[in-house]
Image: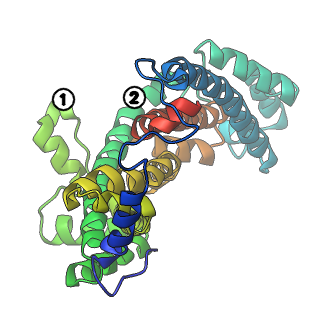
Amino acid sequence: MGQHDPGGDGVLHRGLVDHALSGARDPAHRGEPQPGRRRAQGRPDARIAGAEPAVTVTIARRLALSVVVLVIVCAITFVIFFAVPGKPAELIAGKYATPQTVALIEKRLGLDQPKPLQFLRFITHAARGDWGFSYVSQQPVLPTILVAFPKTLSLTLGALVIWILLGVPVGILSALKPGSVWDRMAMVGALVGISMPAYWIGLLFLRLFADLLGWFPLGDYEEIARAGVSGWAHHLALPWVTLALLYAGWYARMTRAQMLDVARLDYVRTAYAKGLSRRAVVGRHILRNALLPLVTMLGMDVAYLLGGAVLTESVFGIPGIGGLAWRAIRMRDLPMVMGTVLFAAVFIVLANLIVDLIYCALDPRIQADA
């Protein structure tokens, strides 16, 4: 975390005279040619010219690596599933079922086959879009997941928008006024948001705003097609804020720390020495470079966001993928467990790929080095 400069904004201005004087003596700052260095005019840099194909190759390489990651995730899930005591056929048959009945169910479901063969069959079928049928509901797995996914997606994206719109601006304002009353209050609030568990916040919000005050519906979910945009957002407001508070506090503190760290770098002081306004320096140099680590964190936080969505869905009664996965684990419904894990892994991989593209857009050096 960046430390407060007793001089307030002095950390952004310190040493400007030295940089200005050195710049006046440096031929490069006056636009004079330097010995041994020539700039080819009228010809684009070869690295920049080939940046776009290089980025395409990099994305293709990461997609191929993502396929390997998905297979490994499925393999780990498969091993853990069968490492837990108990048999799925016994749960399906019931407590008083005979061994013959259990064996018959295992044969019908293909559970009597060798475990590597079962895993290979799942992978090959999943690649064709056939994710099997649920042991419990006898419904196809993929369509069942696709029905629940929009609810989880709306919860996840809503929380994502709130924490970015809340956390990043709070961190920016705190970095621009370090040590101020606003800075202290904002950082204390961020620390409180980080410290409270999401499920506890959800229960508190339900009790206060839904049960006592009646401002929001209690344990209900409405489809956007039936309730309209306003009604749909009204039902999801508490879950959104519950899931976003933790990340908003974390991103506020990280944004502040990154901006204060970047503000101490030499090129920021040089920008001031060249006469750029404070707004231009903050926007072009400090903020843009301070956001790069946050973009990287965003890709990793998607996985944690899905984990938090499971708890939030259970607290607010949202029938999303989290509840689907939890019921499948309790009932040892292997196809549904594998399907929800694979679907979540695909979602995380795609989210990280999008983050990589955003990173390339924010930092052109990535395109040149790709």
- Given residues 23 and 92, the one toward you in this image is 23
Q: Earlier in the sequence, mark 1 or mark 2?
A: 2
- Given residues 323 and 72, the one toward you in this image is 72
Place residue 133 in its image quadrant.
top right
Q: How many marks?
A: 2
* Outermost bottom residue: 6
Q: CA distance from mark 1 to mark 2?
A: 14 Å
SS of the residue at dot 1? helix
22 sits left or right of 50 in the view: left
How packed is label 1: few (under 14 Cα within 10 Å), some, or many (20 or more)?
A: few
* Outermost right residue: 114
- Which amino acid is tagged 2? Val
Name the residue tied to disc 1.
225
How packed is label 2: few (under 14 Cα within 10 Å), some, or many (20 or more)?
A: few
Name the residue tied to disc 2.
147
Provide residue 76's location: percent of width, then percent of height: 75, 41
What's the residue at 69%, 37% (across, down)? Answer: 73
SS of the residue at dot 2? helix
273 sits left or right of 111 in the view: left
Image coloring type: rainbow
Instruction: Using the rendered image of the protein, determine whether residue 204 is visible from the camera's viewpoint.
Output: no
